[in-house]
Amino acid sequence: MEKYRLTQTTFFNAVQDSIREVEKQMLAQADDYHPELHAALDLLLSSGGKRIRPALTLLTGRMLGADPDRAITLASAIELLHTATLVHDDLIDSSLLRRGNPTLNSRWSPGAVVLAGDFIFARAAKMAAATNSVAVMQLFSQTLTTIVNGEITQLFATHHPVTRESYYKRIYAKTASLFETSTQAAALISETGETERESMRRFGYEIGMGFQIIDDILDFTGEQMTVGKPVGSDLRQGIITLPTLYYIENHPDDQGVKSLLDPDCQDFDKTGVKLVESIRNSDSIQMAYHEADQFVHRGIQNLDDLPRNPEREYLRELALYIVERRR
Amino acid sequence: MEKYRLTQTTFFNAVQDSIREVEKQMLAQADDYHPELHAALDLLLSSGGKRIRPALTLLTGRMLGADPDRAITLASAIELLHTATLVHDDLIDSSLLRRGNPTLNSRWSPGAVVLAGDFIFARAAKMAAATNSVAVMQLFSQTLTTIVNGEITQLFATHHPVTRESYYKRIYAKTASLFETSTQAAALISETGETERESMRRFGYEIGMGFQIIDDILDFTGEQMTVGKPVGSDLRQGIITLPTLYYIENHPDDQGVKSLLDPDCQDFDKTGVKLVESIRNSDSIQMAYHEADQFVHRGIQNLDDLPRNPEREYLRELALYIVERRR
């Protein structure tokens, strides 16, 4: 625990001031528009989040000598894009809470929430354009495409069994794509070579995959208070994640597994609660942790070729922090 | 009527092939993604629309010597942006028909429609980035901001009386901003000077304002079959447009006007139907036509400084076509 806290403090402290500036610039995006939009952004920003994507962009930019103001603009664009996707996600899932805070759709009509998300997309695009890089814009629009295509795929596929391959595709779309963009775009606005840019892209990709696997584990192991939703909520919604995939492979004869995979099963709710408990207490959790570790350590290896400066060490710490979120 | 048809034929014929290419490129934006997204884009494209924005971009680009492929990319980006906003609009208004064709939300769940709109926004941004112009990207994101802020403003203000000034602001956000971008962005990708660019921006702005005023008139005068929605549907929803504003000014003692402006009025539905009929038969319609004419002719004046070639004449015809839509 002590190590966890220390690690978090060190790399977050290094970018804390810049992250405050990112949050200021995000909020300022609503300054000249309808007051309700300002209130919405304020609500969204005050419900926090770890700002891990801006931290990635800021540290990568610093490590590679990017202009600090440009890096802050880019980090704001990325976090706004992330925020906009969450606004529409919460609407689609009818979620009333995120991280224990009220969502926008707990207060606004669905139509207003659609428009608030659209507004934040527009401002994200505006800030991405303000980096003055066509390459960043291309990456940005491609990442949004990937994220939304992943959500559409999930929406049309809920309650179907998944393979390991489709799970990786889904978590890439959901999380790793924007982590990848956070580091890759920071390299794009720096005076750096193709090799270093590719190393940073891979770093972002691998730790993004690790991050989402840990999130999927926490859905089983976390306390409701910490995670902000009921234990096993993914599985209860028919979403199969890595711990479940391992459990299916290792316990093909388990009654819960059979119900889960039976498309005609009518009473999954009852066996589902038991299945969540079985997975939670099985070695599938450790196997998933192991896999997240592997992703993160592959990510860290990519830092070897990069400038040996404090930021590189912070990025390594950030990567390790991801797999240490085991509470 | 004959003149109307001839005018439309001439300038549309000039860009018909390019518009087919625009539609092809728009549809191709879903090629590598979830099949349902392809089906959605196909449905949206097959329900037509006049493609007046792409025509504006293509003609302006040709007049100013822009690279033809780049102009097609830009025109596709603009029409995709327009399409995405319509998808979310129809969802918010729960519209089941647009131009007599089924909307996406008549077939899909609300969540899927939100995501389909987001996907089309992402692809619009991708095509805007493919024009390789940071200035185009900035204009694009600013225009989306303007459109969405206008919709939020309208959403939070329904049933409130409006002034002429707020009406102009609303139709700028709703329509003229994207017309302005269609011509201005085409000038930006051409090798042309600041003065010509500003003239084309003003041309787009003025005819866009005229276009929306005509649309607002057609809501009163059009046949349900042509307009695709009941006569006077704006007013029935509490949206006050130019014909109503003129009618209020000229008939302050009309019973329907009094009910409309009374925030406590409970039975506007009954007086509303009569008010629609009164406005439809009043000189407010002609006054609104006169105003649309003024906008369009101010727009046409801006063409004086531009290269004297066939495209300039087509743009003039396109502008006149806008005010001739009096059916």
Image: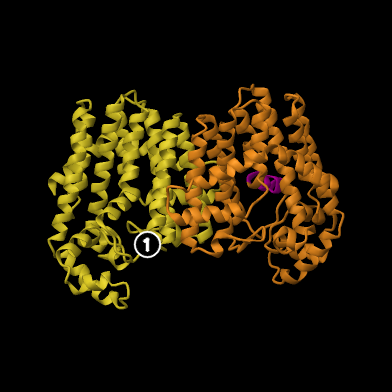
Chain colours: A yellow, B orange
Which image quarter holds the C terminus of chain A? bottom left
- For the residue pair A298 and A187, the one nearer the viewer reads as A298
Residue A217 in percent (x, y) is at 22, 57
Q: Is residue B311 left or right of residue B37?
A: right
Q: Is residue B178 left or right of residue A169?
A: right
Amino acid type, residue under disc 1 in the picture: Ala
Magenta segment, which residues? Answer: B165-173
Residue A155 in percent (x, y) is at 40, 60
Residue at (22% x, 46% y) in the render: A322
Q: Is residue A249 among the parts visible in the rendering? A: yes
Please tell me whether the stretch drawn in magenta is mainly helix, strand or loop: helix
The quadrant holding residue B234 is bottom right
Residue at (53% x, 64% y) in the render: B107
Residue that label 1 marks: A157
Q: Is residue B167 magenta?
A: yes
Residue B191 in percent (x, y) is at 61, 22
- For the residue pair A317 and A238, the one nearer the viewer reads as A238
Residue A269 in percent (x, y) is at 29, 75
Residue at (40% x, 37% y) in the render: A139
Q: Is residue A206 left or right of residue A42?
A: left
Residue B77 drawn above or below residue B85: above
Residue at (26% x, 32% y) in the render: A199
Residue B285 drawn above or below residue A235: above
Q: Specify few, some or many for label 1: CA neighbours under 10 Å numbering under 14, 14-19, or 20 or more.
A: few
- For the residue pair A269 and A113, the one nearer the viewer reads as A269
